[in-house]
Image (spheres, grey):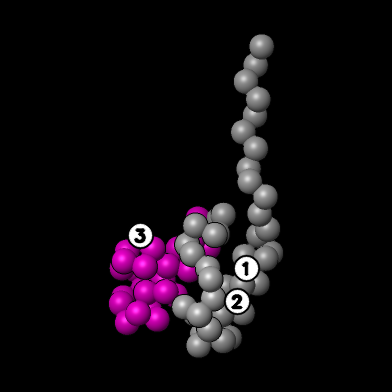
Amino acid sequence: MTAPAAIAPLHSEEAERSVLGGLMFRPELIGKLPIEVNDFFAMRHQAIWSAMMNRMLGLPAWASAAGA
């Protein structure tokens, strides 16, 4: 008997890109939305979100405080 294949949780690349892109046009909304880094499935989107949060907090984009 073989083990069942791992199933990725429901996610939408397009939705994640839309949220991040929208926040690039409206950066004043960063930090006001109930979004956390783990809400993004794609690792690259998690990295972008962390960088955006860090910049909002006045930290370097590559700092790990907001993404922890």
Numbered disc 1: secondary structure: helix
Question: Horizontal and vertical percent for residue 65?
Answer: 31, 66
Residue 65 in view (yes/no)? yes
Quadrant in which residue 19 is drawn = bottom right
Numbered disc 3: secondary structure: loop
- Report if the CB atoms under discs 3 and 2 are less than 8 Å apart: no
- Report if the CB atoms under discs 3 and 1 are less than 8 Å apart: no
Alpha carbon of mark 3 to alpha carbon of mark 1: how far?
21 Å
The amino acid sitting under disc 1 is Arg
The amino acid sitting under disc 2 is Gly
Residue 44 vertical placement versus 1 (above, below): below
- Asked whether residue 25 is drawn in magenta, I would say no
Which residue: 57% across, 73% down?
A: 20
Seen from the viewer's position, the closer of residues 29 and 6 is 29
**Label for residue 68?**
3
Quadrant in which residue 2 is drawn = top right
Which residue: 32% across, 64% down?
A: 64
Counting residues from the start of the chain, the first of labels 3 and 2 encountered is: 2
- Disc 1 crowd rating (10 Å Cα; few below 14, some 14-19, many 20+) is some
Q: Which residue is mark 2?
A: 21
Task: Specify whether 10 is left or right of 29.
Answer: right
Part of the protein shown in magenta:
43-68
Alpha carbon of mark 3 to alpha carbon of mark 2: how far?
22 Å
Q: Which residue is mark 1?
A: 17
- Asked whether residue 50 is drawn in magenta, I would say yes
Question: Horizontal and vertical percent for residue 54?
Answer: 37, 74
Which residue: 53% across, 71% down?
A: 34
Seen from the viewer's position, the closer of residues 60 and 66 is 66
Task: Specify whether 53 is left or right of 13.
Answer: left
